[in-house]
Structures are given as C-alpha cells and as structure tokens.
Amino acid sequence: MRTAMFLLFSLLLTSCSGGGTRTVRPGEKLVVMASTTHLAALAMAVAGESATVQLLPREGTDPHSFEATAEDRRRLEGAHLLLINGLKLETFDAAKLAAAAGITLVDCSAQIPKSFLIAPGGDLHDHGHDHGEQDPHVWLSCEGAAFQAQAMARAMASLDSSNSEGYLKRASEFQARVLKLRDDSKARLATLPDRSFVTDHDAFAYFAREFELKNLGFLRKLPGKEPTLEERRSLEAAIRKSGAKAIFTEPGHDPAASETLAKSLGVKLAQLDPFEIGKPSATAYEETMRKNLQAVLEALK
C-alpha cells in the first residue's frame, strides 16, 4: 500500500512539474522555494519543522513583476522544490529557472479542477492583466488555498519520503481549518442585508464567490496603475446604480483615488489584503483571511 501511494504521488508530481528530480539525501533537510508570499505561507504550514521554506522574491516585491537575479538563481541551486502559483500569475520563465537550477518545479494550481476556475475580468470593464483564460487568484478562496496546500504536500512527500506522513497530515489539518473558517464565516456574512462592494483591483472573484458576496468591479486595471477619468466615472455610475456599500483598498497601494471616490459617493472605505506582498509564516494565510472577512463584516453591516 505504501509503495502504491508513493507511485501515485510521483504521478501527480510529474503531471505538474518540470526541471530536476533532486531528492533529499540522508541527513539533508528539504529546501522549498516559493514564488509568492501566499505560497510560502502555505508551504510553511505544510512543512512544519521538516523542511526549510524560503520566499524567492525579496519581501515586498510585486509577484506580477518579479525577475530573478543572479543571487536568486544561486539560492535556487540549494533548493529541492520551486513552488509557483501558475495560471500565468508569474511573469518569469519558471520552467527554465528550475531546469537551470536542477530542481523540481511544482505548479500548485495544475490539479485544481477546471470547474473551480473563474475567467478573468470584472462586471464593469475589462482589465489589462495577461493572465490567460483563468483568474489566477485562487488562494483568496479557502477551498483554492486547500487545493494548493495539498499539491505542495504531495510534492514534498515525493522528494522527502521519511517525512511524507507529516506533510500530508499537516496539509489535511490545514484544509480542515480553512474549510471550517469558510463555513463559519459564510454563516456570519449571511446576516448582511447588502453584500455589494468594489475593490482596488480584480483579485477577489474567488473570495466573492466563496462567501456569496458581489464584487461589482475594480478601480484599477493593473495593481499600482491609476484609473483614467473615464474609468472613474464609469465606476462611480455603477456604484450609484447598484448601491454598493464599500470600496476596498489594498496594502501597499496609494489609496488616493479610492478615498476620493468613497467621499464623493458617501460609501465606506476599508481594506482587503490579497496577500501578494508581506511576510510569510505558518499562520499568516489564516490570519489574513480572518482579517479580510472581519473587514467585510464591519464595512457592509
């Protein structure tokens, strides 16, 4: 049975990986490199004390624009796994980078059912991301984060067989916790009389779907890019028509445009964190989601 399980792990890993197949030698510790803050946080929750997890970009780097430096490539050569979000979130050539370092590349979204994925874009206007056919922000759903945690657990178990049971157990425990958070929060959000809002950019489609909210649109086509006057007027008209109660900004973004719009419309201004930047930790994902859910409850009550 144990052999059959590991054959299954290997098959699943092969279907979503590239680069090398360096395994953990006796006395060596698994080293996992993550392309985004949220992946590093999920990996830390899965790894426990059995593996070392590092963030590939410098903390605070926008994952949409990261490009590996010579130092980043040297760091990768000391790792076993490179975790990426996939769905065209990363703009660098991850397969080439992993192959050059001789390590295994794991696309943490590759095994997510297509029926779960959402086409990119918003209700009000198109956006300028080049993310392909699916919205890549799957981790802003508790279920999506659980899919990704399971994918990285299988990869860790395949390369570090002596600690495989621990990786799989912690991934299952993480899944149970976040799905309970989802269910408990949905019950609280169900009491809101109006669940409509606008976000800073188009990152929250999965979040809105999972918690039965209505994300009417977004202020920016690209993170950090100021909206045009025409876009502001279009969004303002849509908010007035819909009766949306709040505009949510994001950490690290200039809130000036959102503040002006919120003031002119008399709606609340609050903050949602897409967890694209920040400091990863084993508890950071759950803490961020709780904070986001509380922000929605307070802004829309």
Image: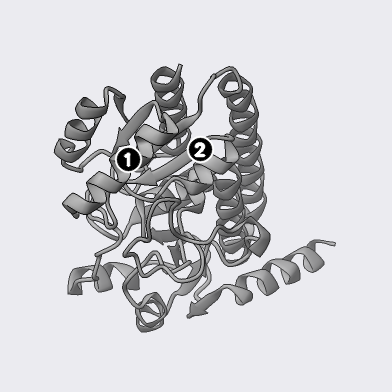
Q: Residue at x 35, y 83 (%)?
A: 100
* Residue farthest toward the right in the current orientation of the protein: 1
> Which scheme is used to colour this image of the protein?
one colour
Provide the secondary structure element on which disc 1 rests. Answer: helix
What's the residue type where badge 1 is placed?
A: Ala
x, y (%) of residue 25? Answer: 51, 68
Residue identifier under label 1: 237
Query: Relative to 156, does residue 67 appear above or below in the rendering?
Result: below
Judge depth for marks 1 and 2 and give the one in front.
1
Location of residue 19 in the rendering, given as x and y in whole percent from the top left corner? 46, 80
As displayed, is residue 299 above or below residue 33? above
Label 2: few (<14), some or many (≥20) within 10 Å? some
Look at the numbered discs 1 and 2 and tell me whether their residues touch, using CB distance below 8 Å. Answer: no
Instruction: Name the residue located 19 percent from the left edge and 31 percent from the top edge.
Output: 259
Q: Give the distance between the C-alpha atoms of the residues marked 1 and 2, in whole angstroms.
A: 16 Å
Residue nearer the viewer, 191 or 104: 191
For the point 32% across and 33% down, which residue is it?
A: 247
Q: Is residue 21 above or below residue 156?
A: below
Residue receiving disc 2: 214
Task: Point out residue 228 in the picture as x, y percentages from the top left corner.
Answer: 18, 54
Callout 2 amino acid? Lys
Q: Position of residue 116 (x, y in %)?
A: 63, 56
Secondary structure found at label 2: strand
Note whether residue 8 is visible.
yes
- Could you classify mark 1 by the number of other residues whose Cα lies within 10 Å: few (under 14), some (14-19), or many (20 or more)? few
